[in-house]
Amino acid sequence: MACTVEFIEFICTTLAPLGEVRSRKMMGDYVIYVNEKCVITACDNIAYVKKLPCIEGMMEDAECGTPYPGAKEAYILDFANSYNVLKIIEVLWEHLPFPKSKQKKK
């Protein structure tokens, strides 16, 4: 089951205080960008964030899962407390790289 548009809009609205938020559909699922960094992978109406040491303490009670077969295990982000979500994404954003620009083929 793919994500619903309503779920993606909810995530984007929740993250709006952090800056420019956009989503990109990829094979039925979505990635969510904040200020041009990919911070969330959304699959089956579940938001996943990378397991990084910088948010380990904040996510110690979080469930884990894989967004799709073959993916690395990730934390499942619980949107019940939007303040916590914003803090987690803010810290995560500081430690994630900007996407690499693609080289054009000659």
Image (cartoon, helix red, strand yellow):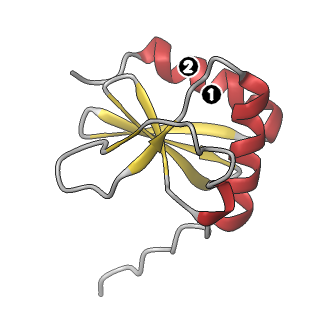
Residue at x 58% of width, y 17% of height: 10
Residue at x 52% of width, y 37% of height: 62
Q: Secondary structure at mark 2?
A: helix
Q: Residues within 10 Å of mark 2 (few under 14, many from 20)?
A: few
Residue at x 69% of width, y 56% of height: 93
Where the C terminus falls, by quadrant? bottom left
Q: How far from the left and from the top, in percent, is residue 98? A: 61, 68
Q: Residues within 10 Å of mark 1 (few under 14, many from 20)?
A: some
Q: How far from the left and from the top, in percent, is residue 34? A: 66, 46
Q: How far from the left and from the top, in percent, is residue 76? A: 47, 36
Please say if 43 is above or below 104: above
Judged left or right of residue 54, residue 104 is: left
Residue 45 is drawn in which quadrant? top left
Judged left or right of residue 79, residue 49 is: left
The residue that label 2 is drawn on is 9
The residue that label 1 is drawn on is 12
CB-based contact (under 8 Å), mark 1 and mark 2: yes
